[in-house]
Amino acid sequence: MRSGLRALERLAGRLPSGVDLYQLRPDGRVLLADRQGARELGPQDPGGGELLRFIDDGQFAHYLVGDAKTSPERPSNATYKLGIVGPRSAFTPHAHGGEHLVLSLGHASCGLYDAERRRVVDLPLAPGLLVRIPELMPHSFANRGTGPLNILAANTGFGIDHEDYAITAAEAERRSDTELAAQLREVERTQRLGTVTAGERLAARLRRLATALEVPR
């Protein structure tokens, strides 16, 4: 099994149904894990249909939000934004009214409520890991590091001012959605910031060195 796939394969069985986890590797490879297992996205991918011809032969695209037929007449109604998460901090656990994709550019943790297994799955995220969270799945998101964490987030259907953008346990209770509220309270109960491992700290130092070497002079 090629580098990177083994680690994602171990995570795959823990993922709730509907959750996708992507790894964008520095060598240009893109790996994808879901409940069924882990694989590499590429021209050789036997899955078929996951990669589309992108303008020219030999170039490929994989839609995360919307599809190839998106147009002004058929909009995907999606948002895409940069987020800055404070050091050693976490968002109030919540659920989004639409599907949600988050690319971690640092060391994060994501707690996902698995309704089928009735438990919270803790998912550590390293730089380059992108998670797709289905609509109305209760989850938490935290910065494990001691510095600011940058994330890139895409949502379908809702901007941050919309009442259904982030539904907390208190809001679910106000709406008398007892099942969602109970799931969110369970995510709250189990939420942990987590820590950055020694290996991750070393990798971060090496990443900063690589960035310094790559800055145009």
Image: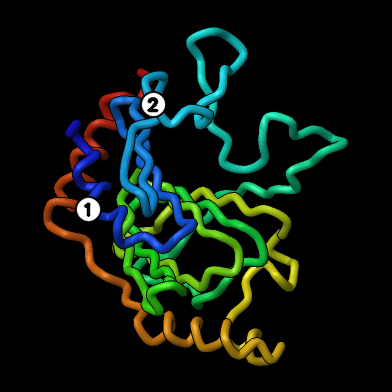
Residue 10's label in the rendered image is 1
Q: What residue is rendered at 43% in x and 47% in y?
A: 130
Along the line of sight, which residue is nearer the eye, 60 or 107? 60
Along the line of sight, which residue is nearer the eye, 58 or 155? 58
Farthest right residue?
73
Along the line of sight, which residue is nearer the eye, 64 or 151? 64
Classify 10 Å Cα crowding around label 2: few (below 14), some (14-19), many (20 and above). Answer: few
Classify 10 Å Cα crowding around label 1: few (below 14), some (14-19), many (20 and above). Answer: few
**Can residue 3 be seen here?**
yes
Could you say which quadrant of the image residue 175 lies in?
A: bottom right
Residue 45's label in the rendered image is 2
Count the marks: how many? Answer: 2
Could you say which quadrant of the image residue 165 lies in?
A: bottom right
Along the line of sight, which residue is nearer the eye, 31 or 163? 31
Location of the C terminus by quadrant is top left
Q: Position of residue 81 (x, y in %)?
A: 60, 49
Q: Position of residue 61 (x, y in %)?
A: 54, 26
Query: Circle 2 sits in a helix, a strand or a loop, which is it?
Result: loop
Residue 114's label in the rendered image is none
Q: What residue is rendered at 36% in x and 46% in y?
A: 33
Q: Position of residue 54 (x, y in %)?
A: 58, 18
Q: Earlier in the sequence, mark 2 or mark 1?
A: 1
Left or right, 168 with respect to 176, comes to left
Left or right, 182 with respect to 67, comes to left
* Contact, mark 2 vs mark 1 (Cβ under 8 Å): no
Q: At label 2, which amino acid type do we have? A: Asp
Query: Circle 1 sits in a helix, a strand or a loop, which is it?
Result: helix
Left or right, 197 with respect to 155, comes to left
**Can residue 105 be seen here?**
no
Q: At label 1, which amino acid type do we have? A: Arg
Q: CA distance from mark 2 to mark 1?
A: 20 Å
Location of the N terminus by quadrant is top left
